[in-house]
């Protein structure tokens, strides 16, 4: 189920070259550009099953390592239509009390349709320059059972920690668009395309009210 290693390395190096080339054009000097390296270990038959049943949100047990940091975790395929691509995006959640770089949830986006790996990263940078709350992104090499799996875009998890860091109300309602095409114009889409991430036991009245307010303008 793993992608051809030589092809992956070739595409990853090309992507990295394009990234550095663009960054060099935007800045007079590049001191250093970090690419994180994560090592994920698991039973290969479980990983093959994960890829085979990519439409399910089933987790498998893994060990994730970065440098000298190591934690027990679970992993699944993430995304919506992107699950159909050969290279899958991954979500990893640490199970024990040992976080890695103070993080316990990792989102690794395959960026399969973007050979430059830049669209999301640059969009994120623009929002941050505008002082608009936005998730952070970085580049990561993933190794699965010590085999190079590819270059991924690591995307910050949107949760209570994100709200606190951006001085937003941590007790407020936080929603996630879980299906491609989720927009704020149809109330009947709320249950189908949106997931409530905080205050899960309460209704989605706040999101419905937002949509109604937008429709009134």
Image (spheres, rainbow, N blue to C red):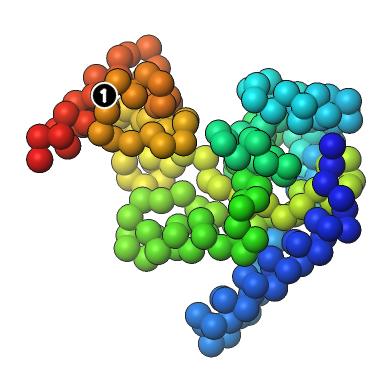
Tell me where residue 118 sits by quadrant: bottom right
- Where residue 55 appears, as percent x and y from the top left, is 64, 25
Task: Give neighbour class at mark 1: few <14, some 14-19, many 20+ (Cα, 10 Å).
Answer: some
- The residue under the point 73% across, 23% down is 53
Q: Is residue 98 above or below residue 20?
A: above
Q: Nearer the viewer, residue 52 or 30?
A: 52
- Where residue 90 appears, as percent x and y from the top left, is 67, 38
- Where residue 149 appears, as percent x and y from the top left, is 80, 48
Image side of residue 154 versus residue 211, left or right: right
Image side of residue 6 versus residue 62, left or right: right
Q: Quadrant of the C terminus?
A: top left
- Where residue 174 appears, as percent x and y from the top left, is 36, 31
- The residue under the point 62% across, 46% down is 109
- The residue under the point 77% across, 52% down is 150
Q: Is residue 40 above or below residue 18?
A: above
Which SS class for mark 1?
A: helix
- The residue under the point 89% across, 30% down is 44
Tell me where residue 204 sits by quadrant: top left
Task: Give the number of callouts.
Answer: 1
Q: Is residue 104 visible?
A: no
Tell me where residue 181 sits by quadrant: top left
Image side of residue 176 versus residue 96, left or right: left
Residue highlighted by disc 1? 187
Q: Nearer the viewer, residue 159 or 193?
A: 193
């Amino acid at each position: 189920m793993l992608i051809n290693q030589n092809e992956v390395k070739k595409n990853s190096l090309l992507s990295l070259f394009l990234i550095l080339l663009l960054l060099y054009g935007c800045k007079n000097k590049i001191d250093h550009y970090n690419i994180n390296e994560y090592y994920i270990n698991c039973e290969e038959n479980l990983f093959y099953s994960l890829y085979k049943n990519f439409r399910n949100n089933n987790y498998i047990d893994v060990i994730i390592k970065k440098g000298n940091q190591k934690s027990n975790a679970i992993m699944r395929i993430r995304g919506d239509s992107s699950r159909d691509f050969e290279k899958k995006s991954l979500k990893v959640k640490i199970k024990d009390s040992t976080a890695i770089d103070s993080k316990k949830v990792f989102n690794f986006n395959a960026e399969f349709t973007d050979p430059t790996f830049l669209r999301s990263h640059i969009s994120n940078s623009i929002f941050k320059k505008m002082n608009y709350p936005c998730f952070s992104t970085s580049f990561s090499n993933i190794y699965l059972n010590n085999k190079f799996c590819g270059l991924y875009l690591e995307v910050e998890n949107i949760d209570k920690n994100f709200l606190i860091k951006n001085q937003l109300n941590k007790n407020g309602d936080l929603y996630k668009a879980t299906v491609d095409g989720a927009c704020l114009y149809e109330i009947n889409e709320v249950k189908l395309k949106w997931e409530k991430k905080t205050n899960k036991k309460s209704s989605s009245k706040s999101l419905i009210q937002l949509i109604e307010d937008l429709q009134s303008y």
